[in-house]
Amino acid sequence: MTAVEQRFREFKMPDVGEGLTEAEILKWFVAPGDTVTDGQVVCEVETAKAAVELPIPFDGVVHELRFDEGTTVDVGTTIISVDTNPGAGVAAPQAAPAAGKAAAGEAAAAVAEPEEKEGRQANLVGYGAAPASTKRRPRKPQPGRSEPAASAGAPAPQEPAPARPEAAPAPSRPEPSPELNGRGRTARPLAKPPVRKLAKDLGIDLETVTPSGADGIITREDVHAAAEAVQAARETPVAAPSEGVTAVGGRERRVPVKGVRKATAQAMVHSAFTAPHVTEFVTVDVTRTMKLVADLKQDPELSGLRVNPLLLVAKALLVAIRRNPDVNATWDEDNQEIVYKDYVNLGIAAATPRGLIVPNIKDADAKTLPQLASALGELVTTAREGKTTPAAMSGGTITITNVGVFGIDAGTPIINPGESAILAFGAVKLQPWVHKGEVKPRQVTTLALSFDHRLVDGELGSRVLADVAAVLERPKRLITWA
Protein backbone atom coordinates (compact mmCIF):
# COMPACT_ATOMS: atom_id res chain seq x y z
CA MET A 1 0.00 0.00 0.00
CA THR A 2 1.41 3.40 -0.99
CA ALA A 3 1.75 6.35 1.37
CA VAL A 4 -1.10 8.10 -0.40
CA GLU A 5 -3.38 5.06 0.00
CA GLN A 6 -2.49 4.84 3.69
CA ARG A 7 -3.26 8.50 4.20
CA PHE A 8 -6.52 8.73 2.27
CA ARG A 9 -9.01 6.20 3.57
CA GLU A 10 -12.31 5.42 1.87
CA PHE A 11 -15.61 4.68 3.62
CA LYS A 12 -17.85 2.40 1.59
CA MET A 13 -21.62 2.01 1.69
CA PRO A 14 -22.19 -0.83 4.17
CA ASP A 15 -24.93 -3.43 4.14
CA VAL A 16 -26.97 -2.00 7.03
CA GLY A 17 -29.64 -4.68 6.73
CA GLU A 18 -29.76 -8.31 5.78
CA GLY A 19 -28.69 -8.74 2.17
CA LEU A 20 -29.57 -5.20 1.05
CA THR A 21 -27.92 -4.18 -2.23
CA GLU A 22 -28.36 -0.40 -2.30
CA ALA A 23 -29.26 2.65 -0.25
CA GLU A 24 -30.19 6.26 -0.98
CA ILE A 25 -28.19 9.08 0.60
CA LEU A 26 -30.77 11.25 2.35
CA LYS A 27 -28.57 13.80 4.12
CA TRP A 28 -24.90 14.62 4.49
CA PHE A 29 -23.92 15.90 7.94
CA VAL A 30 -20.37 16.83 6.89
CA ALA A 31 -18.67 18.64 4.02
CA PRO A 32 -15.15 18.61 2.54
CA GLY A 33 -12.77 20.15 5.04
CA ASP A 34 -14.73 19.06 8.12
CA THR A 35 -12.92 17.20 10.86
CA VAL A 36 -14.48 13.83 11.73
CA THR A 37 -13.82 11.40 14.56
CA ASP A 38 -14.25 7.66 14.89
CA GLY A 39 -17.95 6.91 15.46
CA GLN A 40 -19.24 10.29 14.24
CA VAL A 41 -22.39 10.15 12.11
CA VAL A 42 -21.53 11.52 8.66
CA CYS A 43 -24.73 10.82 6.71
CA GLU A 44 -28.22 9.38 6.81
CA VAL A 45 -29.23 6.78 4.23
CA GLU A 46 -32.53 5.13 3.40
CA THR A 47 -32.65 1.46 2.55
CA ALA A 48 -35.59 -0.61 1.44
CA LYS A 49 -36.39 -1.13 5.11
CA ALA A 50 -35.42 1.90 7.19
CA ALA A 51 -33.56 5.18 7.47
CA VAL A 52 -30.14 4.60 9.05
CA GLU A 53 -27.38 6.94 10.21
CA LEU A 54 -23.86 5.89 9.21
CA PRO A 55 -20.88 6.56 11.54
CA ILE A 56 -17.37 6.93 10.14
CA PRO A 57 -14.91 4.30 11.49
CA PHE A 58 -11.78 6.50 11.61
CA ASP A 59 -10.52 10.03 12.37
CA GLY A 60 -9.43 12.66 9.88
CA VAL A 61 -10.54 15.49 7.61
CA VAL A 62 -13.18 14.96 4.94
CA HIS A 63 -11.47 14.99 1.56
CA GLU A 64 -14.37 14.31 -0.78
CA LEU A 65 -18.06 13.36 -0.82
CA ARG A 66 -18.46 11.05 -3.80
CA PHE A 67 -22.25 11.35 -4.19
CA ASP A 68 -24.89 14.04 -3.80
CA GLU A 69 -27.93 13.79 -1.56
CA GLY A 70 -30.76 11.86 -3.20
CA THR A 71 -28.39 9.49 -5.02
CA THR A 72 -28.94 5.73 -4.76
CA VAL A 73 -25.61 3.96 -4.19
CA ASP A 74 -24.78 0.27 -4.39
CA VAL A 75 -23.51 -1.45 -1.26
CA GLY A 76 -19.70 -1.60 -1.32
CA THR A 77 -19.27 1.65 -3.26
CA THR A 78 -17.06 4.36 -1.75
CA ILE A 79 -19.18 7.30 -0.61
CA ILE A 80 -16.63 9.45 1.25
CA SER A 81 -12.85 9.74 1.45
CA VAL A 82 -11.02 11.01 4.52
CA ASP A 83 -7.51 12.41 4.93
CA THR A 84 -6.26 10.66 8.07
CA ASN A 85 -3.08 12.77 8.25
CA PRO A 86 -3.99 16.26 7.05
CA GLY A 87 -0.86 17.85 8.47
CA ALA A 88 1.50 15.93 6.20
CA GLY A 89 2.25 16.56 2.53
CA VAL A 90 1.63 13.93 -0.10
CA ALA A 91 4.74 12.44 -1.67
CA ALA A 92 5.49 13.65 -5.17
CA PRO A 93 5.08 11.02 -7.89
CA GLN A 94 8.47 11.81 -9.43
CA ALA A 95 11.98 12.33 -8.13
CA ALA A 96 13.02 15.78 -6.99
CA PRO A 97 14.56 18.00 -9.71
CA ALA A 98 18.28 18.58 -10.01
CA ALA A 99 20.26 20.92 -7.78
CA GLY A 100 19.71 24.56 -8.61
CA LYS A 101 15.91 24.00 -8.69
CA ALA A 102 15.49 22.99 -5.04
CA ALA A 103 12.82 25.57 -4.38
CA ALA A 104 10.73 24.34 -7.30
CA GLY A 105 11.19 20.75 -6.11
CA GLU A 106 9.97 21.60 -2.62
CA ALA A 107 6.85 23.19 -4.05
CA ALA A 108 6.21 20.22 -6.34
CA ALA A 109 6.45 17.86 -3.36
CA ALA A 110 3.66 19.79 -1.63
CA VAL A 111 1.28 19.25 -4.52
CA ALA A 112 -0.75 16.02 -4.50
CA GLU A 113 -0.41 13.59 -7.35
CA PRO A 114 -3.22 14.13 -9.86
CA GLU A 115 -5.93 11.54 -9.29
CA GLU A 116 -6.97 9.50 -12.28
CA LYS A 117 -10.08 8.01 -10.63
CA GLU A 118 -13.36 9.50 -11.78
CA GLY A 119 -11.57 12.32 -13.59
CA ARG A 120 -10.81 14.16 -10.34
CA GLN A 121 -7.72 16.35 -9.94
CA ALA A 122 -5.45 16.90 -6.99
CA ASN A 123 -5.52 19.97 -4.80
CA LEU A 124 -3.24 21.51 -2.21
CA VAL A 125 -3.07 20.13 1.32
CA GLY A 126 -6.13 21.53 3.06
CA TYR A 127 -8.48 20.47 0.25
CA GLY A 128 -9.89 23.62 -1.16
CA ALA A 129 -9.12 27.25 -1.67
CA ALA A 130 -9.28 29.68 1.20
CA PRO A 131 -12.69 31.36 1.55
CA ALA A 132 -11.34 34.74 0.50
CA SER A 133 -9.65 33.49 -2.66
CA THR A 134 -10.61 34.49 -6.16
CA LYS A 135 -11.02 32.23 -9.15
CA ARG A 136 -7.93 32.01 -11.34
CA ARG A 137 -7.46 30.77 -14.83
CA PRO A 138 -5.66 27.40 -15.04
CA ARG A 139 -2.08 27.48 -16.28
CA LYS A 140 -1.00 25.07 -18.97
CA PRO A 141 1.53 22.54 -17.67
CA GLN A 142 4.96 22.84 -19.23
CA PRO A 143 7.05 19.70 -19.74
CA GLY A 144 10.13 19.40 -17.56
CA ARG A 145 9.07 22.15 -15.18
CA SER A 146 7.61 22.14 -11.72
CA GLU A 147 5.40 24.88 -10.34
CA PRO A 148 7.43 27.62 -8.65
CA ALA A 149 7.43 27.64 -4.89
CA ALA A 150 5.35 30.22 -3.06
CA SER A 151 7.37 33.12 -1.73
CA ALA A 152 7.60 33.59 2.03
CA GLY A 153 4.59 35.39 3.44
CA ALA A 154 2.61 35.15 0.20
CA PRO A 155 -0.68 33.24 0.14
CA ALA A 156 -0.57 29.74 -1.29
CA PRO A 157 -1.88 29.39 -4.84
CA GLN A 158 -5.57 28.50 -4.88
CA GLU A 159 -5.68 26.44 -8.06
CA PRO A 160 -3.31 23.55 -8.88
CA ALA A 161 -2.18 22.74 -12.37
CA PRO A 162 -4.83 20.62 -14.07
CA ALA A 163 -4.17 16.90 -14.48
CA ARG A 164 -5.14 17.13 -18.14
CA PRO A 165 -5.36 20.11 -20.47
CA GLU A 166 -9.14 19.68 -20.72
CA ALA A 167 -9.75 19.33 -16.98
CA ALA A 168 -11.64 22.24 -15.42
CA PRO A 169 -10.09 23.98 -12.38
CA ALA A 170 -11.60 23.28 -8.97
CA PRO A 171 -13.98 26.11 -8.04
CA SER A 172 -12.96 28.32 -5.16
CA ARG A 173 -15.15 28.60 -2.09
CA PRO A 174 -17.30 31.75 -1.73
CA GLU A 175 -16.53 34.44 0.80
CA PRO A 176 -18.44 33.52 3.99
CA SER A 177 -21.01 35.97 5.24
CA PRO A 178 -21.66 36.64 8.97
CA GLU A 179 -24.47 34.06 8.80
CA LEU A 180 -22.14 31.34 7.47
CA ASN A 181 -19.52 29.34 9.27
CA GLY A 182 -15.84 29.28 8.45
CA ARG A 183 -16.31 26.77 5.64
CA GLY A 184 -18.65 28.94 3.64
CA ARG A 185 -21.88 27.06 4.43
CA THR A 186 -24.75 27.53 6.80
CA ALA A 187 -24.03 26.42 10.36
CA ARG A 188 -25.93 23.23 11.20
CA PRO A 189 -28.76 23.71 13.74
CA LEU A 190 -28.27 21.83 16.99
CA ALA A 191 -30.65 18.88 17.34
CA LYS A 192 -30.46 15.22 18.27
CA PRO A 193 -30.83 12.61 15.48
CA PRO A 194 -34.41 11.61 16.49
CA VAL A 195 -35.44 15.27 16.37
CA ARG A 196 -33.84 15.66 12.93
CA LYS A 197 -35.72 12.62 11.71
CA LEU A 198 -38.98 13.99 13.12
CA ALA A 199 -38.41 17.30 11.35
CA LYS A 200 -37.69 15.47 8.09
CA ASP A 201 -40.85 13.39 8.40
CA LEU A 202 -42.95 16.49 9.10
CA GLY A 203 -41.28 18.48 6.32
CA ILE A 204 -39.85 21.08 8.69
CA ASP A 205 -36.58 22.87 7.89
CA LEU A 206 -34.60 23.05 11.13
CA GLU A 207 -33.14 26.36 9.96
CA THR A 208 -36.60 27.91 10.50
CA VAL A 209 -37.18 26.43 13.97
CA THR A 210 -36.60 28.54 17.08
CA PRO A 211 -34.79 26.39 19.67
CA SER A 212 -35.97 26.30 23.27
CA GLY A 213 -33.57 23.71 24.70
CA ALA A 214 -30.40 24.35 26.65
CA ASP A 215 -27.47 25.77 24.62
CA GLY A 216 -29.78 26.41 21.66
CA ILE A 217 -30.74 22.77 21.07
CA ILE A 218 -33.94 22.20 19.10
CA THR A 219 -36.39 19.89 20.91
CA ARG A 220 -39.25 17.70 19.68
CA GLU A 221 -41.70 20.28 21.04
CA ASP A 222 -40.04 22.98 18.93
CA VAL A 223 -40.49 20.86 15.79
CA HIS A 224 -44.12 20.09 16.59
CA ALA A 225 -44.79 23.78 17.22
CA ALA A 226 -43.24 24.68 13.88
CA ALA A 227 -45.31 22.02 12.13
CA GLU A 228 -48.50 23.34 13.72
CA ALA A 229 -47.62 26.86 12.61
CA VAL A 230 -47.05 25.71 9.04
CA GLN A 231 -50.34 23.82 9.03
CA ALA A 232 -52.23 26.81 10.36
CA ALA A 233 -50.70 29.08 7.72
CA ARG A 234 -51.85 26.97 4.82
CA GLU A 235 -54.73 28.61 3.03
CA THR A 236 -54.99 26.26 0.09
CA PRO A 237 -54.62 22.49 -0.31
CA VAL A 238 -52.47 22.98 -3.40
CA ALA A 239 -48.80 22.75 -2.45
CA ALA A 240 -45.72 23.43 -4.51
CA PRO A 241 -44.03 20.31 -5.88
CA SER A 242 -41.49 18.96 -3.39
CA GLU A 243 -37.99 17.77 -4.19
CA GLY A 244 -38.06 14.76 -6.46
CA VAL A 245 -41.63 15.50 -7.58
CA THR A 246 -42.27 16.45 -11.20
CA ALA A 247 -45.38 18.51 -11.91
CA VAL A 248 -47.20 17.58 -15.11
CA GLY A 249 -49.52 20.21 -16.55
CA GLY A 250 -50.41 21.46 -13.07
CA ARG A 251 -52.85 18.57 -12.59
CA GLU A 252 -50.56 15.60 -12.06
CA ARG A 253 -47.48 14.82 -10.00
CA ARG A 254 -44.82 12.20 -10.63
CA VAL A 255 -42.88 10.90 -7.63
CA PRO A 256 -39.93 8.50 -8.00
CA VAL A 257 -40.63 5.08 -6.49
CA LYS A 258 -37.79 4.26 -4.11
CA GLY A 259 -36.95 3.37 -0.54
CA VAL A 260 -39.71 1.84 1.58
CA ARG A 261 -42.39 2.43 -1.05
CA LYS A 262 -40.39 0.55 -3.68
CA ALA A 263 -39.62 -2.34 -1.34
CA THR A 264 -43.24 -2.57 -0.21
CA ALA A 265 -44.51 -2.65 -3.78
CA GLN A 266 -42.09 -5.40 -4.77
CA ALA A 267 -42.87 -7.47 -1.67
CA MET A 268 -46.63 -7.17 -2.07
CA VAL A 269 -46.54 -8.13 -5.76
CA HIS A 270 -44.32 -11.11 -4.96
CA SER A 271 -46.59 -12.21 -2.11
CA ALA A 272 -49.85 -11.72 -3.99
CA PHE A 273 -48.69 -13.69 -7.03
CA THR A 274 -46.71 -16.36 -5.17
CA ALA A 275 -48.75 -17.32 -2.12
CA PRO A 276 -52.37 -18.38 -2.81
CA HIS A 277 -54.31 -16.10 -0.48
CA VAL A 278 -57.50 -17.08 1.34
CA THR A 279 -59.28 -14.56 3.57
CA GLU A 280 -61.93 -15.36 6.17
CA PHE A 281 -64.00 -12.93 8.23
CA VAL A 282 -65.74 -13.02 11.60
CA THR A 283 -67.74 -10.33 13.38
CA VAL A 284 -67.48 -10.48 17.15
CA ASP A 285 -68.90 -8.75 20.24
CA VAL A 286 -65.89 -7.24 22.03
CA THR A 287 -67.78 -5.38 24.75
CA ARG A 288 -66.08 -7.39 27.52
CA THR A 289 -62.68 -6.82 25.94
CA MET A 290 -63.23 -3.06 25.82
CA LYS A 291 -64.24 -3.13 29.49
CA LEU A 292 -61.11 -5.12 30.32
CA VAL A 293 -58.98 -2.53 28.50
CA ALA A 294 -60.51 0.21 30.65
CA ASP A 295 -59.79 -1.82 33.81
CA LEU A 296 -56.21 -2.57 32.80
CA LYS A 297 -55.50 1.10 32.30
CA GLN A 298 -56.14 1.55 36.01
CA ASP A 299 -53.91 -1.37 36.97
CA PRO A 300 -50.75 -0.10 38.76
CA GLU A 301 -48.73 -2.94 37.23
CA LEU A 302 -49.46 -1.53 33.77
CA SER A 303 -49.01 2.11 34.72
CA GLY A 304 -47.23 4.07 32.00
CA LEU A 305 -47.54 1.25 29.46
CA ARG A 306 -49.44 1.23 26.18
CA VAL A 307 -52.77 -0.43 26.99
CA ASN A 308 -55.33 -0.47 24.17
CA PRO A 309 -57.54 -2.95 22.26
CA LEU A 310 -54.63 -3.85 19.94
CA LEU A 311 -52.74 -5.19 22.96
CA LEU A 312 -55.50 -7.69 23.73
CA VAL A 313 -55.91 -8.58 20.05
CA ALA A 314 -52.19 -9.40 19.97
CA LYS A 315 -52.50 -11.50 23.12
CA ALA A 316 -55.57 -13.30 21.70
CA LEU A 317 -53.66 -14.14 18.50
CA LEU A 318 -50.73 -15.49 20.51
CA VAL A 319 -53.13 -17.70 22.45
CA ALA A 320 -54.66 -18.94 19.18
CA ILE A 321 -51.19 -19.75 17.82
CA ARG A 322 -50.37 -21.70 20.97
CA ARG A 323 -53.53 -23.76 20.46
CA ASN A 324 -52.84 -24.11 16.70
CA PRO A 325 -49.03 -24.01 16.31
CA ASP A 326 -48.99 -25.21 12.69
CA VAL A 327 -50.20 -21.79 11.53
CA ASN A 328 -46.85 -20.32 12.61
CA ALA A 329 -44.82 -21.53 9.64
CA THR A 330 -43.30 -20.54 6.33
CA TRP A 331 -43.07 -22.09 2.87
CA ASP A 332 -39.55 -22.90 1.64
CA GLU A 333 -39.91 -22.97 -2.14
CA ASP A 334 -36.25 -23.79 -2.85
CA ASN A 335 -36.20 -26.91 -0.67
CA GLN A 336 -39.90 -27.72 -1.05
CA GLU A 337 -40.37 -27.80 2.72
CA ILE A 338 -42.70 -26.29 5.31
CA VAL A 339 -40.71 -24.75 8.15
CA TYR A 340 -42.64 -24.81 11.44
CA LYS A 341 -41.41 -22.29 14.00
CA ASP A 342 -41.47 -22.77 17.76
CA TYR A 343 -41.25 -19.03 18.41
CA VAL A 344 -43.47 -16.12 17.42
CA ASN A 345 -42.01 -12.85 16.13
CA LEU A 346 -45.22 -10.84 16.03
CA GLY A 347 -45.26 -8.18 13.30
CA ILE A 348 -47.28 -4.99 13.73
CA ALA A 349 -47.96 -3.08 10.50
CA ALA A 350 -47.24 0.62 11.04
CA ALA A 351 -48.02 3.49 8.69
CA THR A 352 -45.24 6.08 8.78
CA PRO A 353 -44.42 9.15 6.67
CA ARG A 354 -41.89 6.97 4.83
CA GLY A 355 -44.49 4.34 4.02
CA LEU A 356 -45.79 1.10 5.50
CA ILE A 357 -43.30 -0.85 7.60
CA VAL A 358 -43.75 -4.05 9.62
CA PRO A 359 -41.43 -4.23 12.63
CA ASN A 360 -41.91 -7.25 14.85
CA ILE A 361 -41.78 -8.10 18.54
CA LYS A 362 -39.19 -10.83 19.00
CA ASP A 363 -40.36 -13.91 20.97
CA ALA A 364 -43.73 -12.29 21.63
CA ASP A 365 -45.18 -15.65 22.71
CA ALA A 366 -42.83 -15.75 25.72
CA LYS A 367 -43.84 -12.32 27.06
CA THR A 368 -46.27 -11.54 29.85
CA LEU A 369 -49.02 -9.00 29.26
CA PRO A 370 -47.00 -6.12 30.82
CA GLN A 371 -43.94 -7.13 28.78
CA LEU A 372 -46.01 -7.30 25.62
CA ALA A 373 -47.50 -3.87 26.34
CA SER A 374 -44.02 -2.42 26.88
CA ALA A 375 -42.69 -3.97 23.66
CA LEU A 376 -45.70 -2.79 21.67
CA GLY A 377 -45.36 0.77 22.94
CA GLU A 378 -41.65 0.85 22.13
CA LEU A 379 -42.29 -0.55 18.67
CA VAL A 380 -44.90 2.09 17.81
CA THR A 381 -42.86 4.98 19.22
CA THR A 382 -39.72 3.91 17.39
CA ALA A 383 -41.62 3.56 14.10
CA ARG A 384 -43.18 7.01 14.39
CA GLU A 385 -39.78 8.58 15.08
CA GLY A 386 -38.31 6.84 12.04
CA LYS A 387 -35.75 4.96 14.14
CA THR A 388 -36.84 1.40 13.29
CA THR A 389 -33.80 -0.68 12.34
CA PRO A 390 -33.70 -3.23 9.50
CA ALA A 391 -33.14 -5.98 12.08
CA ALA A 392 -36.42 -5.06 13.78
CA MET A 393 -38.24 -5.66 10.49
CA SER A 394 -36.63 -9.00 9.73
CA GLY A 395 -37.58 -12.47 10.87
CA GLY A 396 -41.31 -11.93 11.42
CA THR A 397 -43.55 -15.02 11.56
CA ILE A 398 -47.10 -13.60 11.64
CA THR A 399 -48.54 -10.08 11.46
CA ILE A 400 -51.40 -7.92 12.74
CA THR A 401 -52.61 -4.87 10.79
CA ASN A 402 -54.88 -2.48 12.67
CA VAL A 403 -57.08 -0.94 9.95
CA GLY A 404 -59.62 0.05 12.59
CA VAL A 405 -57.63 3.15 13.51
CA PHE A 406 -58.70 4.56 10.13
CA GLY A 407 -62.37 3.75 10.74
CA ILE A 408 -62.27 0.73 8.39
CA ASP A 409 -64.46 -2.26 9.25
CA ALA A 410 -62.50 -4.99 7.44
CA GLY A 411 -60.22 -5.80 4.53
CA THR A 412 -58.29 -8.53 2.76
CA PRO A 413 -54.68 -7.93 3.86
CA ILE A 414 -51.78 -9.29 1.83
CA ILE A 415 -49.47 -11.66 3.69
CA ASN A 416 -46.06 -10.29 4.62
CA PRO A 417 -43.45 -12.21 2.55
CA GLY A 418 -41.96 -15.15 4.42
CA GLU A 419 -44.98 -15.53 6.71
CA SER A 420 -48.09 -17.68 6.58
CA ALA A 421 -50.86 -15.38 7.81
CA ILE A 422 -51.90 -11.83 8.67
CA LEU A 423 -54.78 -10.70 10.90
CA ALA A 424 -56.68 -7.47 10.16
CA PHE A 425 -58.34 -5.80 13.15
CA GLY A 426 -61.27 -3.59 12.14
CA ALA A 427 -62.89 -0.61 13.82
CA VAL A 428 -64.76 -1.17 17.10
CA LYS A 429 -68.22 0.36 16.80
CA LEU A 430 -71.37 0.48 18.89
CA GLN A 431 -73.94 -1.63 17.03
CA PRO A 432 -77.26 -3.38 17.77
CA TRP A 433 -76.46 -6.95 18.81
CA VAL A 434 -78.46 -9.85 20.15
CA HIS A 435 -77.19 -10.41 23.68
CA LYS A 436 -78.88 -12.88 26.03
CA GLY A 437 -81.94 -13.01 23.81
CA GLU A 438 -82.34 -9.23 23.55
CA VAL A 439 -81.19 -6.62 21.05
CA LYS A 440 -78.77 -4.33 22.84
CA PRO A 441 -76.08 -1.83 21.85
CA ARG A 442 -72.74 -3.65 22.00
CA GLN A 443 -69.14 -2.95 21.01
CA VAL A 444 -68.59 -4.93 17.81
CA THR A 445 -65.65 -5.43 15.46
CA THR A 446 -64.74 -7.51 12.42
CA LEU A 447 -61.61 -9.63 12.13
CA ALA A 448 -60.14 -10.83 8.82
CA LEU A 449 -57.48 -13.51 8.55
CA SER A 450 -55.55 -13.96 5.29
CA PHE A 451 -53.43 -17.11 5.09
CA ASP A 452 -51.22 -18.97 2.63
CA HIS A 453 -53.30 -21.88 1.40
CA ARG A 454 -50.20 -23.89 0.49
CA LEU A 455 -49.50 -24.64 4.16
CA VAL A 456 -52.63 -23.45 5.98
CA ASP A 457 -55.81 -25.17 4.88
CA GLY A 458 -59.34 -23.90 5.52
CA GLU A 459 -59.78 -25.91 8.71
CA LEU A 460 -56.61 -24.64 10.36
CA GLY A 461 -57.24 -21.04 9.29
CA SER A 462 -60.83 -21.19 10.56
CA ARG A 463 -59.75 -22.59 13.94
CA VAL A 464 -57.21 -19.84 14.42
CA LEU A 465 -59.68 -17.08 13.56
CA ALA A 466 -62.41 -18.65 15.73
CA ASP A 467 -60.03 -18.86 18.70
CA VAL A 468 -59.05 -15.20 18.37
CA ALA A 469 -62.73 -14.22 18.24
CA ALA A 470 -63.58 -16.41 21.24
CA VAL A 471 -60.88 -14.80 23.40
CA LEU A 472 -61.99 -11.28 22.45
CA GLU A 473 -65.64 -12.12 23.12
CA ARG A 474 -64.83 -13.61 26.52
CA PRO A 475 -61.35 -12.38 27.55
CA LYS A 476 -61.42 -14.57 30.67
CA ARG A 477 -60.33 -17.35 28.31
CA LEU A 478 -56.90 -15.71 28.39
CA ILE A 479 -56.51 -17.20 31.86
CA THR A 480 -57.59 -20.72 30.97
CA TRP A 481 -56.16 -20.97 27.43
CA ALA A 482 -52.87 -19.08 27.80
Image (cartoon, helix red, strand yellow):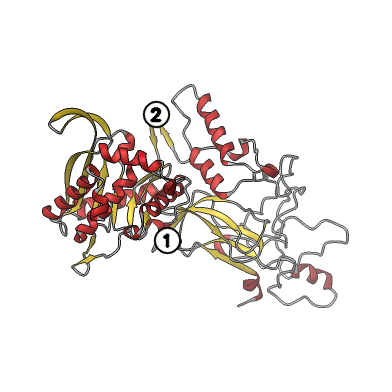
Q: Which residue is tagged 1?
A: 17
Percent of width and height locating residue 186? 67, 43
Q: Quadrant of residue 441?
A: top left
Q: Residues within 10 Å of mark 1 (few under 14, many from 20)?
A: some
- Left or right: residue 90 versus residue 286 is right
Q: Quadrant of residue 324?
A: bottom left
User: Can residue 157 be seen in this snapshot?
Assistant: yes
Q: Quadrant of residue 2?
A: bottom right
On residue 431, the disc is none
How many numbered tags mark residues here? Answer: 2
The answer to whether the residues at label 2 and label 1 have Cβ atoms under 8 Å apart is no
Percent of width and height locating residue 134? 75, 47
- Left or right: residue 6 versus residue 245 is right
- Left or right: residue 360 versus residue 71 is left
Q: Residue at x 50, y 25 (%)?
A: 234
Percent of width and height locating residue 368? 36, 56
| Distance Cα–Cα, label 2 vs label 1 | 39 Å
Determine the secondary structure under disc 1.
loop
Q: Residues within 10 Å of mark 2 (few under 14, many from 20)?
A: few
Q: Which residue is tagged 2?
A: 249
Q: Residue at x 61, y 35 (%)?
A: 208
